[in-house]
Image (cartoon, rainbow, N blue to C red):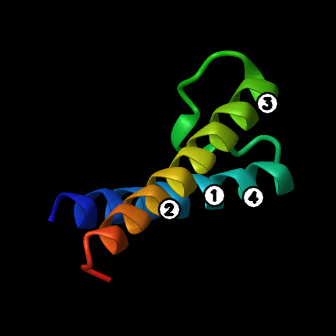
Amino acid sequence: MKYDVLLGLGMVMLGLFGQGLIRLLVDHGDRGLLAWLPGGFGLSLAAHAVLTATGVLLAGWSHTRSKALGRR
């Protein structure tokens, strides 16, 4: 159950911040959920990239752990 929740969280992070990353690359002024961050375009781009990568790694790790336990 724990790995299913982590998988869902990772996929939500991937969806939200991946979409935000693409939107930020297309329209530099639209910083999305992280508009409150100071630092402008560069920091916002880096934060979106890190959070997207975190979502990918979390979803992949939890899927692998769930599969090792025989749940997938």
Q: Residue at x 81, y 27 (%)?
A: 42
At x 58%, y 22%, the residue is: 37
Residue carrying label 2:
60
> Toward the viewer: 65 or 29?
65
Residue 58 position within the rendered picture, expressed as x and y whole percent measured from the top left:
45, 52
> Which amino acid, by three-letter code, is at mark 3?
Phe
Point out residue 11 in the picture as x, y percentages from the top left corner: 45, 64
**Alpha carbon distance from label 1 to label 3:** 16 Å
Q: Quadrant of the C terminus?
A: bottom left
* C-alpha span from label 1 to label 2: 15 Å
How many angstroms separate mark 4 from mark 1 (CA)? 6 Å
Mark 4 vs mark 3, CA separation in Å: 13 Å
Earlier in the chain: of badge 1 and badge 2, it is 1
In this rendering, the label closer to the viewer, 2 or 4 = 2
Q: Could you tell whether 71 is left or right of 7 in the image?
A: left
Vertical order, 67 against 7 (above or below): below
* Residue at image point 50% right, 62% down: 60
Residue 10 is labelled as: none
Amino acid, disc 1: Gly
Mark carried by residue 41: 3
Q: Which of the 4 image quarters holds residue 67? A: bottom left
Q: Are marks 4 and 1 in contact (CB under 8 Å)?
A: yes
Return the residue at label 1.
Answer: 18
Q: Residues within 10 Å of mark 2 (few under 14, many from 20)?
A: some
Name the residue type under label 2: Gly
Q: Could you say whether the residue bearing mark 4 is in a helix, strand or loop?
A: helix
Residue denoted by label 4: 22
Q: On the rendered structure, is 25 left or right of 19?
A: right
Is disc 1 placed on a helix, strand or loop? helix
